[in-house]
């Protein structure tokens, strides 16, 4: 009953990934096929050679196929719920985290998108999933802010938590975790309500929840 009133699993809003995967894949494959054909002599609708168009199409196929491969991985990686409330705390599955986001001299909003894509593809970071774990002991607050169409759920944690053995293997913990409405199907107010409810329960009440291990 409690888990129906206060959900513990939240799925990703995946229709965006379907659209991005379809369009980048379609254009990437089209460019990869038509580019070499024009380069090797196929003529355009006017009966003229179009080697320049073939060259540009071939070049453009590279970033589009890179984006397609990253979006396809994201689509597959988000089939299961990406946010889970567990006995030990809250777990968020983050897909394709970029180390460029952590470099102070390269602000995320100012980093050219193409550079991010190339880095994610070449470094392999675009094909990895990372679990961010927030133990109940370190969770300070879960609040929703922002405009109606751009809501953000912020989980603030204590920096005093230093027990890596308490986390699942290859999981990380952060001081602040921001979750955007575009990421989840459920309204962020519902997610915040559930997190705050289970955070207020004692250990015995949370035993009915799955473990993050």
Image (tube, rainbow, N blue to C red):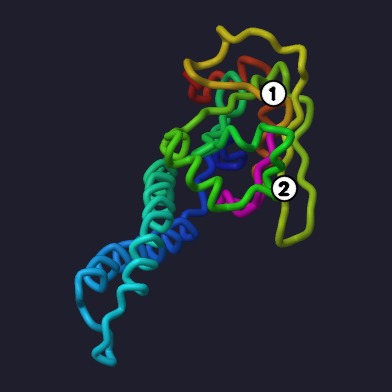
Q: Is residue 193 visible?
A: no
- Mark 2 neighbour density, 10 Å: few (under 14) some (14–19) many (20 or more): many
154 vs 68, nearest the viewer = 68
Horizontal arrangement in the rendering, residue 108 relative to residue 7 (left or right)? right
Instruction: Point out residue 32 in the picture as x, y percentages from the top left corner.
Output: 29, 62
Which of the two labelled residues, at mark 2 and mark 1, occupies the earlier sequence position? 2
Q: Is residue 39 above or below residue 191?
A: below
Instruction: Point out residue 68 in the picture as x, y percentages from the top left corner.
Output: 39, 54
Q: CA distance from mark 2 to mark 1?
A: 24 Å
Bounds of the magenta segment? 177-188
70 vs 39, nearest the viewer = 39
Marks 2 and 1 in Cβ contact (< 8 Å):
no
Q: Which residue is mark 2?
A: 152
Q: Which quadrant holds the N terminus?
A: top right
SS class of the residue under badge 1? loop
Q: Is residue 186 above or below residue 209?
A: below
Q: Is residue 181 above or below residue 26?
A: above
Q: Which residue is mark 1?
A: 201
């Amino acid at each position: 009953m409690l888990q129906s009133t206060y959900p513990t699993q939240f799925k990703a809003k995946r229709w965006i990934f379907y659209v991005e995967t379809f369009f980048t894949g379609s254009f990437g494959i089209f460019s990869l096929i038509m580019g070499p054909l024009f380069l090797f002599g196929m003529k355009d609708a006017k009966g003229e050679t179009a080697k320049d168009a073939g060259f540009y199409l071939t070049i453009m196929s590279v970033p589009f196929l890179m984006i397609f491969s990253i979006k396809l991985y994201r689509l597959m990686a988000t089939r299961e719920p990406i946010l889970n409330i567990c006995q030990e705390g809250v777990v968020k599955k983050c897909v394709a985290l970029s180390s460029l986001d952590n470099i102070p001299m390269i602000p995320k909003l100012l980093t050219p998108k193409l550079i991010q894509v190339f880095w994610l593809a070449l470094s392999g970071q675009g094909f990895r999933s990372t679990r961010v774990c927030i133990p109940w002991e370190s969770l300070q607050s879960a609040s929703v802010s922002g405009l109606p169409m751009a809501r953000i759920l912020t989980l603030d944690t204590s920096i005093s938590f230093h027990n890596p053995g308490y986390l699942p293997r290859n999981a990380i913990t952060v001081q602040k975790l921001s979750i955007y409405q575009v990421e989840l199907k459920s309204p962020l107010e519902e997610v915040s309500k559930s997190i705050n409810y289970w955070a207020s329960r004692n250990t015995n009440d949370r035993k009915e929840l799955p473990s993050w291990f």
